[in-house]
Image (cartoon, helix red, strand yellow):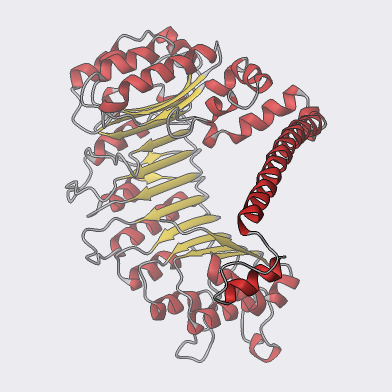
Amino acid sequence: MDSAILDALRSNFTSPPGIHVPSAIVESQGEVDTLEVQIRQLRAQLQILEERRDVAQGRCLNLKSLSAPIRRLPSDILLEIFSHTLWYGSADPIYDPFPLLLTHVCSYWRHLALSTPTLWSSIRARPTDGQLEYYRALWNHFLLHSGTAPLSLFLDLSYVEWEQDELLDQFVEHSRRWKAVGFTMDSIQPLRRLEEDDMNQLQSLALAALDTVSSIFLHDITCFRSAHALVDVSLGGYWDPSLVALPWGQLTTLSFGSSITPASLNLDIYLSVLRHCTQLARLEFNFGDCDVDERRPSRLPGYITLPKLRSLSVEGALHIMDDLIFEKLGLPGLTEFIYHPGFVSGIPRSLESSWKAFQSCAGRSRCKLSTISLTRGSVFDVDVIGWLDCLQSAREVTLDLTSLVRRDQKTFIEYFSNRDVGSSGQTAPCKFPSMQRITIHGLQSSPSVIEALVSMARFRCRLHSPESSSSLETPTTLLFASFGKQLAAELEFCLRDCVAAGLTLHFHSPLF
């Protein structure tokens, strides 16, 4: 029948032979309607089957979840995992709401999180005026569920123009629980209301002010004087250490300034309190390239000896501030030194006076450094070499050469390869003879840089050729070398013999 219809369509006939068209139309339409009914019935059955499948699949997933390994973890192990997942041990209720996310997973996790005070006892935030209402509610939630757990609070209120006092009052009510606190703020009124017996748990304190703080108000803050557990203090911006009552004699870590709030006062103010810091093990100065006029000599008499200091960091010092620090300090126990010189608009500066002052300090103190970190910055290369020459006892060296072009980077790499020959034809003494670990930031990948690194590493791993080793002083074997990720990947094949000899080749992330 269908072929007869097709033949008729290809011709001029209006009716195929033996077919009554009107009757055939009625018959075909009836067949279509019957099939349509059957299709709807099958679709309804298919929908029922799909729904039954989804229910069964959900049941299967739930049954699998019941047997998942994480459900078999004891609650104390699960809580340990929760604690380690917190970012840097603290939580920002807006940008890092991890404790809040835990409460949305399942009822068991919600119960576990809300009944664990330590998950809610750390807050790190930098609110703006437009976020205050949201922050207040979240902080109340955190403080409520932290129970009696010691608090770690780090609040930067530099973007809050109004209501700083009111915000701080929210935390002052819980001051007896303060364990580690850091406040960047202009208003200090709430701190004046604290009592000395409120600070019994306080171990770490960081205070920074972006504007001048009244000396009258600073004298009124006495609550930290009797904090018998306080060992770590950081004062940034315009916080005057000579006016703040602190237990200087028990501090083990002291920082003046930071990268965000650099030290902004006269250097003598900072040096004057160091005479009382007899237990200090770590000291940091960060001037953030602030143009503080320190061209005059220090007025403080004599040397300031810090007998227990092990680590000294000086960053962003301009003019002769770094010289004055080295000239005034006696550091007989110093083993770690970090130096990042300051610069203004990329203008090279001479470091000759600073490395000579440090050399005098080290000689006077009779200290022996084991770890150094040096940033080349915007200074003359000869002065960086001068610094390296006076730090030769170090076993661990970190160097930042980001600001150098490839040619000059190669020169600094070769410094560690002991290839210099004097006018008499004799090879110069081995540089850093005790070095076991080296980290170099900012290297640019190029054939010359890679060649210099391979040569340096092979020499330091004692894999130089026998004919060239007879006149060379053999250094301590290099055990660890760290470079940028791309460079480390390119060196992996070239240094396979060094790795086989015991070298650990590591890659690090960029500093910025």
Residue 291 left/right relative to 251: left
**Is residue 70 or residue 157 the one in the foreground?**
70
- Number of marks drawn: 0
The correct choice, above or below, for 465 with respect to 510 in the image is: below
Q: In the image, what residue occupies the spot 19% across and 49% down?
A: 291
**Is residue 374 or residue 168 the one in the foreground?**
168
- Find residue 363 and report its horizontal and vertical position in percent: 44, 56
Residue 118 left/right relative to 386: right
Quadrant for the C terminus in the image: bottom left
Q: Is residue 471 visible?
A: yes
- Find residue 315 and report its horizontal and vertical position in percent: 35, 50
Q: Which image quarter: residue 108?
A: top right
The correct choice, above or below, for 215 with respect to 443 in the image is: above
Q: Is residue 390 visible?
A: no
**Is residue 509 or residue 99 the one in the foreground?**
99
- Find residue 57 and report its horizontal and vertical position in percent: 76, 35
Residue 7 left/right relative to 452: right
Q: Which image quarter: residue 63?
A: top right
Quadrant for the N terminus in the image: bottom right
- Find residue 243 and report its horizontal and vertical position in percent: 26, 23
Q: In the image, what residue occupies the spot 59% across and 79% down?
A: 454
Q: Which image quarter: residue 408?
A: bottom left
Q: In the image, what residue occupies the spot 73% across and 67% down?
A: 502
